[in-house]
Image: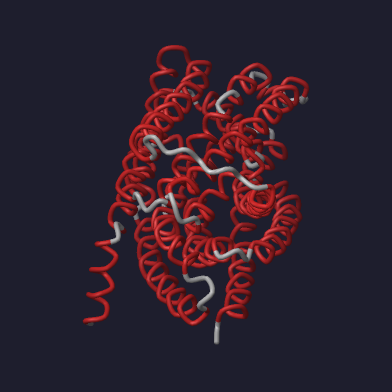
Amino acid sequence: MKSVVGSLSRLKDRGAPAVLAGSVLTKAAAFLGSIVLVRVMSKYEYGVLSYMENVYTYVYLLAGLGLNNAVFRYVVLKEGPSEKLSVIRFVLARGAAINIAIVLVGIAFAILFPHAPEFSRAASLLPVMLLALPFQFSYDTFSYSLRALFRNGTYAIVAVEAIALVWTGKVVGTVAAGLDGAVWAGVAAYTAMAAGCLVYFRTVLFPGVEPSPTSRGEAKSYLAYGAQFMVTNGMWAMFLQNDLLLIGMLTGDPSSVADYRVAYAVPSMMAILSSSIGTFVAPYFIRHEGDRRWVWSNYKKVIVVTSLVLGPLCLGIALFSKPFVGFFYGVEYLNAVPLMSLLLVSSFITNGIRYTTANLLSATGKVKANMVIAVCGIAAQLALNLLLIPQFGEYGAAATSIVVYSGMAIAVVVVFKKIYQR
């Protein structure tokens, strides 16, 4: 008991409550924003917006070729402020050049792609949405840097401000100008956050600091790590996007896409805990990555705590899902309640076990193992979705998630155990 109390006290001193509070408030703001947005948009508009945001998410997986992930690792490993600022500056500068090219290609794709008639407005609005990509990348780079610098309180405040600004902008934009307004508001929000973070870093965190030169070897290390992390992280992130895309393509029904997204809104909030823990503990695992005994011992603690908290939460939400959906989203979405129950099972598996393990593997430099598992998981997901969605619609996608996430969770745990158990 004393060891548990002591551990909790150390976590408090290191800023764990700030990270958790930031994640909780961020998810809460996003959730409330989605509720309000559903209320001010028609179901058709929300389905089209979901379709476009889904495509945007695919493109964003390529943003900066993953360089901002290098910030999270290498800023921790660097010693002085000049060296740390050097990493941040390199990522921002090189990432900006890469992102301009990505946006130009993405705009051409959005215009020329033969969207289904139900989603035809994407041809004109997706190019606008893609303009946010460079600014979101810059904001994410600053956000990762705050955590790598152990500025936990500032990290939490900035995260909440960003998500509140984005969702408030979308709601206000929708009320003012419909779907067009929501898209333009997203671009404006990320532009404002990137500019604000830039000013904060130069005037508060690194006033008068000149970044040290980045050697060719360091640049190669950043680019290689970022690219590997991009592929791995992209694979993990693509799972929900694949579901939404295939539901839209194989059913041709915006309502099915909207139902799935609403059903996934609450289960996705289970990521609050796993992402908070991952964000908080990753820098410490990076510092101790050479000490296998320390890593294995603390990994077991993280998994046990995460799983024990998530299990009751998922069960409780499942029991009250019907009144919850009816109250917040309206009776037109009550048909998504059984779907939500299936996705809660999937959420427990992926957030309780898979995400935490995979995140720590990547943080400690074991990215390639994650890539192999992710590639196999994507292949299995696509195959099962193509088989099940035509027969069972969005429920086929939910069943696929349970099966695939279970297999991937087992795989990452086996790999982690093989590397670190002594």
- Left or right: 385 in relation to 134: right
Residue furthest bottom as drawn: 422
- The reply to whether residue 146 is visible in this rendering is yes
In this rendered view, identify the residue nearer to me: 301 or 324: 301
Apparent side of residue 16 relative to residue 184 in the rendered image (left or right): left
Name the spot of residue 178 as percent of width and height, x first. Answer: 48, 16
Residue 72 percent coordinates (x, y): 50, 52
**Number of numbered discs present?**
0
Could you tell me if residue 330 is visible in this image? no
Where is residue 395? Give x, y as percent.
60, 51
Residue at 56% in and 49% down: 69
Q: Quadrant of residue 312?
A: bottom left
Residue 413, above or below 29: below
Quarter of the image where the C terminus is located: bottom right
Q: Position of residue 71 (x, y in %)?
A: 53, 48
Q: Nearer the viewer, residue 197 or 6?
A: 197
Residue at (29, 52) in percent of width and height: 18
User: Front-most of 223 and 217?
Assistant: 217
Relative to 9, is 325 on the left or the right?
right
At x 46%, y 12%, the residue is 177
Please say if 73 is above or below 419. above
Q: Quadrant of the N terminus?
A: bottom left
